[in-house]
Amino acid sequence: YFANKFKDVLFHQHKKDGSLRYKYPLIQYKIIDKKPLIIGLGEGAEKIINNFLNIDELRFENKVYINPAGRLNVDQEELFINNNYDMPAYKYNFITPWLGLSQKNYKKYRHDYLDASAKKKMKFLKRLIIGNILSFAKGIDWWIEEEIVIEAKLEEISVKFKNEAMIGFKGYFYSNIYLPEFIGLGKSTSRGFGTISREEILD
């Protein structure tokens, strides 16, 4: 795995003592259209830029890429809340399963929402998406004071992760917040889960 090549905690989310770094991952590893992709945000982007020429091997999902043909894109995007319209201006598709349930809210979901009405269940899941977005924002030192609006259509699916069956979701959501493409939301974002693509539905 690429993360094992570099000692910096941002590459693998593990501290020197073996404990986890419980913050939003600033370096994320993904497979998009069957191609490996590494996303760096803020300080994570700087680490990738500084080490880009040292990448001679990538390991993704039990596949090894030797001397991968790499392309480095550096983008600076202004992130903001768009309240210029009566409806959310952006649509985000989960192009990989969203693992939105932590151990705590998994129990709450199973007990209170698994057999609840679709409206009640979606209200709960929308709150989780907002929480995920706020975790991302905090991770890049973006303090959001305005209200985040979410409308979502999600379908529950079974996801196998580390040989365990987990509840995941596929689908999409609309929002008034402008987010970078291909970042992850939810659990295990550093491993590619919860990756979003963006569509601007209002100019």
Image: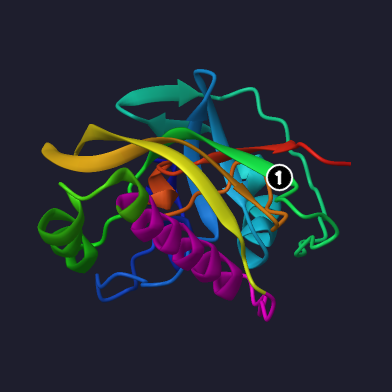
Horizontal arrangement in the rendering, residue 173 relative to residue 79 (left or right): left
Residue 203 on image: x %, y %: 89, 41
Horizontal arrangement in the rendering, residue 75 relative to residue 146 (left or right): right
**Which residue range is magenta in the image?**
121-146
Q: Nearer the viewer, residue 113 or 33?
A: 113
| Element assignment for label 1 | strand
Quarter of image, res 112:
bottom left
State whether residue 96 is above or below residue 26. above
Residue 125 on the magenta segment? yes
State whether residue 25 is above or below residue 151. below
Crowd band around label 1 with a 10 angstrom C-alpha radius: few (<14), some (14–19), many (20+): many
Q: Nearer the viewer, residue 195 or 26?
A: 195
Mark 1, residue position: 90
Q: Main secondary structure of the magenta part?
A: helix
Residue 81 on image: x %, y %: 75, 64
Q: Amino acid at mark 1?
A: Tyr
Residue 55 appearing in the image: no
